[in-house]
Image (cartoon, rainbow, N blue to C red):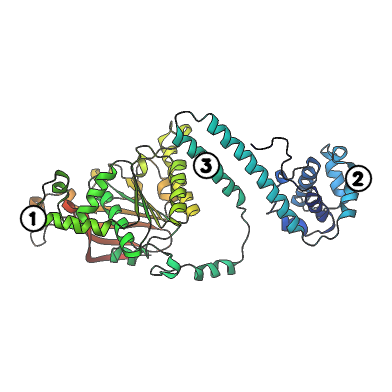
Amino acid sequence: MVAVDRLPPFDVEAEESVIAALLVDEDAISRVESIVAPEDFYRDQNRWCYEAALELWSRNEPINQVTLAHTLARRGKLDEAGGLPFISRIVADLPTAIGVEHYAQIVRRDAMYRTMIGVGSQIVQTAYHGGPDLEGAITRAENLVMGLRTAQRTGDLLPLQHYLDEFWEKPAIDSVFAGTIGAVRSGFMDVDDLLGGFHRQDLIVLAARPSVGKSSLLLNFARNAAVGQSARVAIFTIEMSGESLAHRLLAAESGVDVTRLRLGQRTEVEERKLMHATEALHPLHIYIDESSIVTIPQLHAKLRRLRQQLGGLDLVLIDYLQLMHGTSRSRENRVQEVSEISRGLKVMARDLEVPIIAAAQLSRAPEMRQPHMPMLSDLRESGSIEQDADVVMFLYRDDIYITREEWELRNFDQPYPEGITKVIVAKHRNGPTGVVHLRFRNHLSRFEDLMVIEEQSA
């Protein structure tokens, strides 16, 4: 049992040393403002003094015993704080103003420990009142712990040199240094040439109308990364079952028609092909979640667990974005809900330092115009998808909209473009846009390189 009569962690000397240093060193406030906040102080009088010092600093006024006392008096807190004798004493007791950052770190550390105690109490209450929803209770507990990590991070201005050094420390697309992966390759030559691979912290949206092949392309990305780079890949399928995804992966790997595979109509030759495909796929680090309802907090919690279990995570795939759920408050407004989801995915990509590729459904607008080529405005239900995404790719196939007979009447000198898929990079935050071509073999759920590239734009 945990003792209930123990005082929470705090260090009065460190708190008073921070306040005293602010009074004798005019530069001290600028060095500790990004480290410690008023609510980090345990003693009320120390918190009031720090708040008063921040107020003086914001007005570009000097911070000393006189101005601090005046500000406290104006706030009605001077007597409660101990008056001028308290302020004079802590200044007299301060051995040196050097090292104020050290004192501030102690104050911040103890504040985090107190927060941990509060989170622990909330988790205990969650366990007592969890009821039948164990998964929900675990998710709430994990979110509380994750909140500690978020609270621990404090932003600050960093010199350019920091980012230049970071650039050279990060592995490149083909790096295998220390077993880490830089950019994750798609496995398609022209796509990788255009994008430079899928970069960590990026949100990539792959959008298309139904039946064009976006789910199959996601699986191809997963397989290619896992095979080519030993990538650790998580797939969230909300629309299809995990069994269906496994069938598609087997069909693509073996060359056996996916329909025959599902129905069990296999010859001995096909059986051998499937066995070889299973041997190739079995050791891959691909993990599938087929939950029918997924929210951003649930997704985040599951990925954190998987990353901890595997010692890292390299690629996350979601099929598809509009089937996810936002918070209960946002469900009354679908546009607001999708905006919350897209923003949450982007924040998650940065927090987990992993590329997230989310399939998305397009509106019916492409079908209502000629040509039927998709545009950014066709992203269904929310313009924030375009805003939050680092890369937006569309899939387009002529054979979806025109039959072989119609094609041959109009284009007698060109072969029917069966399965020829345009991958349209309509947005690329950190590089060029353009169009590349892949061949889609629908009966195998497999995309292949096609040696055609259209012009690219900056």
**Label 3 – label 2 distance at C-alpha:** 44 Å
Camera-near label (3 vs 2) is 3
Circle number at residue 408: 1
Frontmost residue, 359 versus 435: 359
Mark 1 neighbour density, 10 Å: few (under 14) some (14–19) many (20 or more): some
The residue identified by callout 3 is 143
Q: Hey, what amino acid is under mark 2?
A: Leu
Circle number at residue 84: 2
Q: Hey, what amino acid is under mark 1?
A: Glu
Frontmost residue, 423 versus 164: 164
Nearer-N-terminus badge (3/1): 3
Mark 2 neighbour density, 10 Å: few (under 14) some (14–19) many (20 or more): some
Nearer-N-terminus badge (2/1): 2
Q: Is residue 20 left or right of residue 159?
A: right
Quadrant for the C terminus in the image: bottom left
- Residue at (86, 40) in percent of width and height: 78
